Image (cartoon, rainbow, N blue to C red):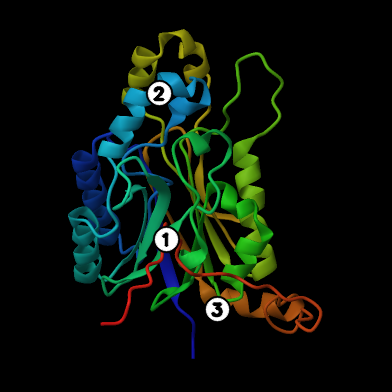
């Protein structure tokens, strides 16, 4: 039986900053546009709804209270009407959508997670994942996630897994997806490619690092990969500079992230977007993952499961467990 040949769309777009209503409209129109181009899988960047908190890179936490309130107000409940509308659209268009968003907590008015939902072609949430460990300054905005969303969605377009930004550095998280038969690896990223002061020595090229991290997954797992970054548009830049004029040079020197695709040998294929908004496309022929598995099949013959064991806790974190008396 032949494996799917799948067209993938990666949305290299900017959200309508801190405005969930307008951003959701942009999500819906982008899904419709990509589906009209016959895309089967449509990917949106990290916390696309409705902002990545770039301001936390250079402002003290005590100066960010107002922006954090706005971030909370522009965030979504996973069981809210906005996600429901995307689920209905996926079902009607028979597409798979990965949407990154700031997720609100039902039990904490100030609790946020960096999350995604992976919605299948039947309109069901196949994976709801909260970033395991917020990176560096992200801890000022988001709580730790859990392992409950570390699962691969078995769609008719292929077996799809995803990780958020720095999680792609975690060998164990990546292997958890590979061990479930992952064929397409989606990685989602913020808008800027580095967060360093002008004039300081460059220590981290994020575009190169992202290609390496996703490329390792492709090479080790013999799967296809997507690097989907959001776009830092002028509206966002003007907002940041107006709110924080003392750091204008810092904001304006940030380089754009990039959106592109990798094959099972970690070679770039399809479109590449960086300095302009748009939707990038690539076609993944999953039949081309078979022969590479002959060389190194880490979840098959090229491993020693009697030597190495990985245990993953996929229970959902909860602040409390009640033990009620039986009536």
| Whether residue 63 is visible | yes
Side of 319 relative to 50 (left or right):
right
**Rendered position, 218 above or below 287:** above
What mark, if any, has residue 318 been given in the picture?
A: 1
Q: Is residue 265 visible?
A: no
Residue 95 sits in which quadrant? bottom left
Residue 107 screen position, x and y as percent: 31, 51
Picture residue at 60% right of the left edge, 18% below the top: 197
Q: Please name which of the two marks, 3 or 1, marks the residue nearer to the observer.
A: 1
Which residue does the numbered mark 2 point to in the structure image?
64
Earlier-in-chain disc, 2 versus 1: 2
Is 257 positioned to the left or the right of 106 in the image? right
Q: Position of residue 40 (x, y in %)?
A: 35, 67
Mark 3 Cα-neighbour bin, 10 Å: few <14, some 14–19, many ≥20: few
Q: Nearer the viewer, mark 3 or mark 2?
A: 2
The image quarter in which residue 90 lies: bottom left
Foreground tag (2 vs 1): 1
- Dot 1 falls on a residue whose secondary structure is loop
Q: Which mark is residue 275?
A: none
The quadrant in which the C terminus is found is: bottom left
SS category of the residue bearing label 3: helix
Q: Determine the CA span between mark 3 and mark 1.
A: 41 Å
Give the structural element (helix, strand or loop) at label 2: loop
Q: Is residue 74 left or right of residue 292?
A: left
Q: Position of residue 284 (x, y in %)?
A: 49, 67
Q: Earlier in the sequence, mark 3 or mark 1?
A: 3
Residue 287 is marked as 3
Vertical position of residue 119 compared to residue 33: above or below: below
The residue closer to the viewer here, 146 or 239, is 146
């Amino acid at each position: 039986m032949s494996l799917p040949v799948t067209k993938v769309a990666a949305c290299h777009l900017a959200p309508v900053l801190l405005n969930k209503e307008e951003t959701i409209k942009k999500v819906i129109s982008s899904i419709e546009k990509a589906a009209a181009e016959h895309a089967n899988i449509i990917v949106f960047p990290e916390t696309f709804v409705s902002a990545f908190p770039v301001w936390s890179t250079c402002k003290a936490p005590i100066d960010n209270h107002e922006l954090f309130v706005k971030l909370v107000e522009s965030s979504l409940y996973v069981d809210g009407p906005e996600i429901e509308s995307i689920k209905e659209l996926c079902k009607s268009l028979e597409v798979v959508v990965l949407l990154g968003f700031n997720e609100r907590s039902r039990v904490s008015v100030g609790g946020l997670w960096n999350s995604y939902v992976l919605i299948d072609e039947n309109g069901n949430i196949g994976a709801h994942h909260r970033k395991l460990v917020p990176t560096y300054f992200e801890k000022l905005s988001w709580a730790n996630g859990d392992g409950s969303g570390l699962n691969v969605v078995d769609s008719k377009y292929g077996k799809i897994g995803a990780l958020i930004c720095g999680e792609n550095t975690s060998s164990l998280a990546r292997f958890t997806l590979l061990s479930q038969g992952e064929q397409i690896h989606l990685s989602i990223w913020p808008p800027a490619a580095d967060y360093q002061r002008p004039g300081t020595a460059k220590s981290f090229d994020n575009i190169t690092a992202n290609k390496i991290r996703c490329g390792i997954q492709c090479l080790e797992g013999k799967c296809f990969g997507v690097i989907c970054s959001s776009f830092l548009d002028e509206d966002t830049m003007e907002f940041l500079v107006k709110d924080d004029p003392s750091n204008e040079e810092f904001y304006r020197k940030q380089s754009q992230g990039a959106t592109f695709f990798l094959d099972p040998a970690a070679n770039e294929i399809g479109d590449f977007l960086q300095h302009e908004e748009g939707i990038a496309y690539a076609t993944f022929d999953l039949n081309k993952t078979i022969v590479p598995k002959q060389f190194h099949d880490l979840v098959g013959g090229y491993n020693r499961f009697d030597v190495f064991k990985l245990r993953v806790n996929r229970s959902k974190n909860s602040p409390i467990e009640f033990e009620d008396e039986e009536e």
